[in-house]
Image (cartoon, rainbow, N blue to C red):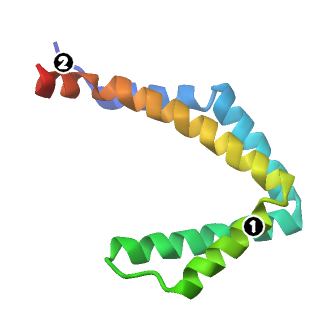
Amino acid sequence: MTVNIYDTANKMEQELRLTNEYQNLKQSFEKVQQDENASALYKKFQDIQSSLQQKQMNGEELTEDEIKKVHEVAGEIEKVDLIKDLMDKERSLNQLINDVNQIIMKPIQELYQG
């Protein structure tokens, strides 16, 4: 039997878009985008986070100033309900994706454990 796992993956991608978790994230993201201040702050946070992750992946040490900056921006984000809601929705979708990933990885786990 020939299986095209990519067809299954594409179907999962389409179905992911229909989940409550994705729809809630999409709505929350749109609300953040509609608020100029929230959108700018969220982009600033993403940019800082991305930059720091890149440094870590390159094996570079983070400076105290960089750590301080990310904490400052995170503190600002905590005061913005739209962004807090968006981050909650991101966590919910992440949990769904992690659950699906565990299902997908089950044969490999069984292979190595059995």
| 110 or 7, nearer to the observer | 110
In the rendered view, would you say 67 is above or below 12?
below
Question: Residue 9 placed where, x, y %?
Answer: 39, 31
In the rendered view, would you say 8 is above or below 49?
above
In the rendered view, would you say 50 is above or below 92?
below
Quadrant, the N terminus: top left
Q: Between tags 2 and 1, which lies in front?
A: 1
Q: CA distance from mark 2 to mark 1?
A: 52 Å
| Circle 2 residue | 2
Quadrant, the C terminus: top left
Question: Residue 50 placed where, x, y %?
Answer: 52, 70
Residue found 70% across the figure and 43% down from its top: 88
Q: Residues within 10 Å of mark 1 (few under 14, many from 20)?
A: few
Q: Amino acid at mark 1?
A: Gly
Residue found 56% across the figure and 30% down from its top: 16
Residue found 22% across the figure and 22% down from its top: 107
| Circle 1 residue | 75
**The image quarter in which residue 39 lies:** bottom right
> Callout 1: helix, strand or loop?
helix
**The image quarter in which residue 36 lies:** bottom right
Farthest residue to the top: give it: 1
Question: Residue 72 placed where, x, y %?
Answer: 71, 75
Would residue 102 be found to the left or right of residue 15 on screen?
A: left
| 84 or 65, nearer to the observer | 65
The disc label shown at residue 46, or none: none
Q: Amino acid at mark 2?
A: Thr
